[in-house]
Amino acid sequence: MGYINLLSDRCFIYHLNEIESINSFTFIDEIDFVYNDIPDELTVSCYFVPIDLDEESIINNEPFFLVHEKFRVFFPINTDIRLNDLVEWNGVKYKAEKPMVKREHHIEVLVKRNSHL
């Protein structure tokens, strides 16, 4: 059984893109960072492992609940995953931290979500 067969989850990856816009008030070019509406990487093989189960929490803030989640995600070595990418898994989007290449074999990324329900 190969490593790729162990990666049983599938996710979408959205890259952070830089766009220039002109501020109509100051006429100065500004740089904005946005995510595409369509994923840049489709059905990427991965494996999500929950970490810090004690820190996983749902906080009752008015008017919404605030959810804190963190996962360690394993990807094949050829996956295009970058810092601050959005990783969508089971309809939920997580922000990626710095990807780490492990022994030129696979990529390991911490992803987290701090969002309202």
Image (cartoon, rainbow, N blue to C red):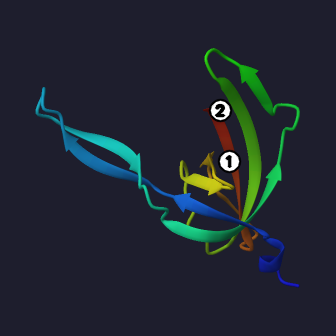
Q: Residue at x 74, y 38 (%)?
A: 69
Q: Secondary structure at mark 1?
A: strand
- Residue 95 lies, in percent from the top left, at 60, 46
- Residue 42 lies, in percent from the top left, at 56, 69
Q: Tell me if 79 is positioned left or right of 35 in this view.
A: right
Q: Determine whether 77 is above or below 54 in the image.
A: below
Q: Residue at x 61, y 48 (%)?
A: 93
> What's the mark number on residue 97?
none
Q: Quadrant of the N terminus?
A: bottom right
Q: Secondary structure at mark 2?
A: loop
Residue type marked 2: Leu
Give the label, 1 or 2, closer to the camera.
2
- Residue 11 lies, in percent from the top left, at 65, 63
Q: CA distance from mark 1 to mark 2?
A: 18 Å
Q: Tell me if 77 is positioned left or right of 58 in this view.
A: left
> What's the mark number on residue 111?
1
Q: Residue at x 39, y 53 (%)?
A: 17
Sort mark 1 into few (<14), some (14-19) or many (20+) by Cα contacts within 10 Å: many
Q: Nearer the viewer, residue 59 or 46?
A: 59
